[in-house]
């Protein structure tokens, strides 16, 4: 059974979408412990709009990629492993290209930060003071909005308090359990 019909996964995928600087990571840092308290095994996929390094110059894995030209480097220890792969292209990654890299059989749920232009269930974060337009009117995959002040537009979507992480976690859990157990 595919719980996210547009994605190559059999487990629920839920996104946090907003313009840069709205507080996606800050909210996820508050939500993750609340969701983990329910016994869920959660993965996070985060989109970055810029080039980034998780490895440090001078380290063997960095040298193997940069000096040696390795397309993929997997670094492993007793506590963790990480795979670094060069994409070889300048196009933005698609969520469906990334999902197969997760060990989905060991997960209950995938949270996604970003990928706002893709179609999957998302919570839009909105801060009117930042001056960005709302995304929900043109994105049918947004299922709720979390706002830090009164929403200045009519909607039938649930509107949550962006500063109330427990209420947002409860909304996500309700969505997850309805989807997972009523599908």
Image (tube, rainbow, N blue to C red):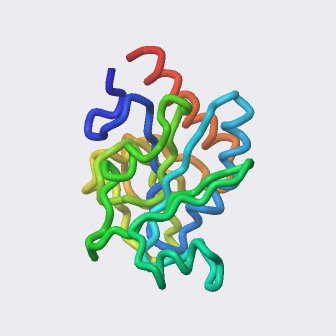
Q: In the image, is residue 113 above or below residue 43?
A: below
* Picture coordinates of residue 156, whole percent (x, y): 37, 40
* Picture coordinates of residue 59, whole percent (x, y): 65, 78
**Which quadrant of the rendered structure holds the C terminus?**
top left
Where is residue 93, by image quadrant? Answer: bottom left
Residue appearing at x 33%, y 20% in the figure:
1
Residue appearing at x 48%, y 85% in the figure:
67
Viewer-closest of 85 and 131 = 85
The answer to whether residue 155 is left or right of residue 75 is: left
Viewer-closest of 93 and 32 = 93
Residue extending farthest to the top is 182
Residue appearing at x 32%, y 26% in the figure:
2
* Picture coordinates of residue 127, whole percent (x, y): 53, 67
Q: In the image, is residue 25 above or below residue 63?
A: above
Where is residue 39, by image quadrant? Answer: top right
The answer to whether residue 129 is left or right of residue 139 is: right
Q: How many marks?
A: 0
């Amino acid at each position: 059974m595919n719980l996210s019909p547009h994605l190559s996964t059999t487990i629920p995928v839920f996104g946090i979408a907003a313009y840069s600087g709205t507080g996606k990571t800050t909210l996820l840092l508050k939500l993750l412990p609340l969701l983990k308290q329910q016994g869920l095994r959660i993965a996070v996929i985060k989109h970055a709009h810029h080039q980034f390094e998780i490895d440090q110059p001078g380290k063997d894995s960095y040298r193997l990629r940069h000096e040696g030209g390795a397309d993929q480097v997997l670094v492993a220890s007793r506590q963790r492993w990480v795979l670094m792969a060069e994409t070889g292209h300048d196009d933005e990654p698609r969520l469906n290209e990334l999902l197969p890299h997760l060990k989905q059989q060991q997960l209950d749920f995938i949270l996604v930060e970003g990928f706002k232009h893709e179609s999957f269930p998302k919570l839009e974060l909105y801060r009117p003071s930042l001056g960005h337009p709302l995304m929900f009117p043109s994105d049918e995959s947004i299922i709720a909005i979390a706002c830090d002040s009164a929403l200045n537009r009519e909607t039938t979507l649930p509107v949550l308090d962006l500063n109330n992480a427990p209420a947002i976690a409860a909304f996500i859990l309700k969505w997850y359990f309805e989807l997972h157990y009523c599908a």
